[in-house]
Image (cartoon, rainbow, N blue to C red):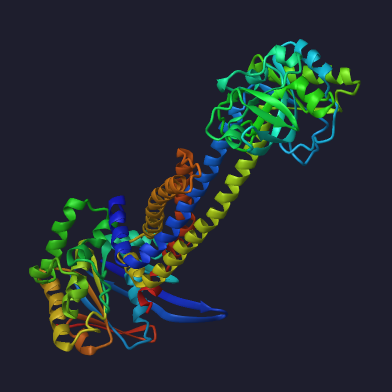
Amino acid sequence: MLECKNISKAYKSGNLETRVLKNASFKINDGEFVAIMGPSGSGKSTLMHILGALDTPTEGQYWIDGQDVSRLTDDELAVIRTKKIGFVFQSFNLLPRTSVLRNVMLPLAYAGVPTEKREEMAKSALRGAAFPEGFWNHYSNQLSGGMMQRVAIARALVNNPALILADEPTGNLDSKTGEAVLQTFQELNEKHGRTIVLITHEREVAEHARRIIQIRDGQIISDEIKK
Amino acid sequence: MPISDILHETYRALTSNKVRSSLTTLGIVIGIASVISMVSIGQGAQGVIQSSIEGLGSNLLTIFPGVVQPGRGIVSSGRGSAQSLKNEDVNILRAVEGVASVAPELSRRFQIVSQVGNNTNSTVFGVGPEYTIVKNLKLSSGVFINENQSRSLARVAVLGATAAADLFGEVDPVGKTVRIGGINFKVIGLLEAKGGAGFGGQDDAVFVPLSTMQKILVGDNYLSTVSVSVADKDLMAQVKDEVTFVLAMKHRVDPAEPDFSIISQADILGTLNQVTTTFTMFLAFVAGISLLVGGIGIMNMMLTTVTERTREIGLRKAIGAKKLDISRQFLAEALMLTFMGGLIGIILGWLISVAVSTFAGIATSVSLMAIIIAFGVCAAIGIIFGYYPARRAANLNPIEALRYE
C-alpha cells in the first residue's frame, strides 16, 4: 500500500523557488491499477520520481507498505527500489549486446539473490510479461520495440515488487503494439493482482486503468474510479 | 553486488569496445615494459661493474699520493704530479698490524717495441714480487718477477694479455725480447686475461721490477701507488686508520690532512653503485613518464565511458544499484585494464631485456623486485586514475541520468 500525505516538491535556483508539486495526498491500495494523467509540465514526472523512490519530497510524507520513505538517503532509497519497485520506462533502457535473460536478471544481482535462483525467477517473470520463449537468448538490441518493452516489464516484475511504475510505456510504440503492452498490464493486474501505476498524458492510455488521477500545475484536480 | 557479477559486467563492458580497450591497455603495456626493461639494463650494468671491481682483488686498500679533490670523486683522482710516496714508506706499512702484504708500484706510459717490429703504447708498471698476490693476478705461462730480480735491477718483463697480443700476436712471448724506452727487456711471463675492461687495465700493461723502473726507466724513487692487502675484511677500517696515522707521522703531516689518500675497494664500489643507482633511477624515471601518460589514457577512456553510459548508470540506480555498486563496477574496469596492461607489459619488458642482452651485448637483469614494484604501480594507477571517473559515475543523479540524451 502506498500513501502520500501533503507532499510538495520545490526546486530552488538562486533565489527563485519553483513549486512543481503542491500538497498532493492520495492512497493506492494493493492490487489497484492507477493512471496518473496530466499534460507535460503538470508535475506528473516529479510525482512519479517520488512514488518510485528516485527522489524525496521537500514537504509531506510518503509511506510504502507502512515505511516512511520521504526522508531517506540515496543509498537507503536504492534499497527501497530494489525491494519494492519495478520500473518500466518509455525508452525501455535495456542493456545492449546483452541477452534478454541477463537483462531480466540484472535487478537480482543488486538485490543479492543467489546466482542459481536468478534464472528461474527471470524465466517466470518473462512468462508473466508474455514474452515469447524462443527469444530468451537473443540480444536485447535485436528485438522489436514491443518485445523490448516486454523485456522491461519482465525486468520490473522479477523482484516481486509492491508496485510497478510505468512511465509513458507506450510512448515509443505504434498504437497496435502499445495496445498489446497495455493489455499485458491489465492482465498482470487482473490475473496476478499486481499494483500498477501508469504515468501518461494520453486519455486513451489512461482509460486502461481502473482509476485515473488527473494532475495539472502541480495539483491533483480529479481522482475518479471507473465502475 | 557480488564480485562474480562485477567481473562479468566488467568483461562485458570491456569486450563491447575491443579496439578502445586494447589501445588504452597499450599505453600501460608500453609504460610497464619500458620501466621493466630500463631498470633491467640499469641493474645489469650495476652487476657488471660490481663483479669487475671485486675481480680486482678484495680486501684491498690503495694509497695515492696527493689529495683526492672533493667533487672530482674517488675514481678520477688528479694525482699526476704529487710525489709524496717513497720507497721508505713501504717498510713502515709492512709493520702495521693486520696488513697481509704491501705492493708498491710506479707506472708510466712508454712506447714498447717487440723483436718482430710491432709496437704499442702501454702502461709500464714497476712492481715487486708480491704484486700478483695483492692484485689477484694469474700467469698463463712463464713466471712473475722474483725477489732477486727486484734487487738486481734485472731487465725482465711480464706482459699483460692485451699487450702481448699487440706485440707478438698469437706467439708465446716468453723468452722473447721487448724494447722499453730504448732498453731491452727479456720477457719471462705472460698474464691471464682479466677482462673487466677499463678498471685497472692490467691486460694492456707491462710489468718490470720496481727497482729497474725507478732507477733505469724513470730515474726517480717515488711511487705512484701502494696497494695494501688486509688479512681480514673486518679489519679494513682499522687498518685504514692505522696506515693513515703511521704514514702521516712518517711524512710529518697532520693525520687529519694527509698528503696522500687511501681508498678501499668498498669506497670504489660504493661510489660506482651510487653512479649506477642514479643511472637506473634516471632510466626508470624516464620510463615512468610513459607509464603516467598510460594512466592518463585510462582516466580519459573511463571518463568517456561514464559519459556514454550515463543512461545505463541511471537505469542501474533505478533498479537498485547503490553508489558503492556503481563505483566498484567502474573501478573494476579501470583495474582490469591496468592489470591486463601490466601483465603484458612485464612479459614484453622481460623479452626486451633478453633481446637487448642477446643482440646488443648489454648485460641486463630483471629482478623479482622490479616486477613486484611494476605490478604495485599498475594497481596504484588503476585506482588513482579510475577513482575519479568511478566516483563521478556513482554520484550521478538517477533522474537526470535516465533523461540524458
Residue at image position (75%, 33%) is B181
**Residue B128 percent location from the top left of the image:** 71, 18
Residue at image position (57%, 52%) is B285
Q: Nearer the viewer, residue B398 or A218?
A: B398
Q: Nearer the viewer, residue B233 or A63?
A: B233
**Residue B338 percent location from the top left of the image:** 41, 55
Quadrant of the rendered image containing residue A73: bottom left
The answer to whether residue B49 of the structure is visible from this angle is: yes
Q: Nearer the viewer, residue B48 or A72?
A: B48
Answer left or right for B37 relative to B179: left
Location of the C terminus of chain A by quadrant is bottom left
Location of the N terminus of chain A by quadrant is bottom left
Q: Nearer the viewer, residue A20 or A99?
A: A99
With respect to residue A213, does B253 lie above or below?
A: above
Answer left or right for B251 relative to B365: right
With respect to residue A72, does B184 lie above or below?
A: above
For the image, the number of numbered tags is 0
**Residue A92 percent location from the top left of the image:** 25, 75
With respect to residue B336, does B315 lie above or below?
A: below
Quadrant of the rendered image containing residue A98: bottom left
Answer left or right for B300 relative to A48: right
Answer left or right for A22 relative to A51: right
Quadrant of the rendered image containing residue A134: bottom left
**Residue A47 percent location from the top left of the image:** 35, 76
Residue at image position (18%, 71%) is A151
Q: Residue furthest right?
A: B252
The answer to whether residue A6 of the structure is visible from this angle is: no
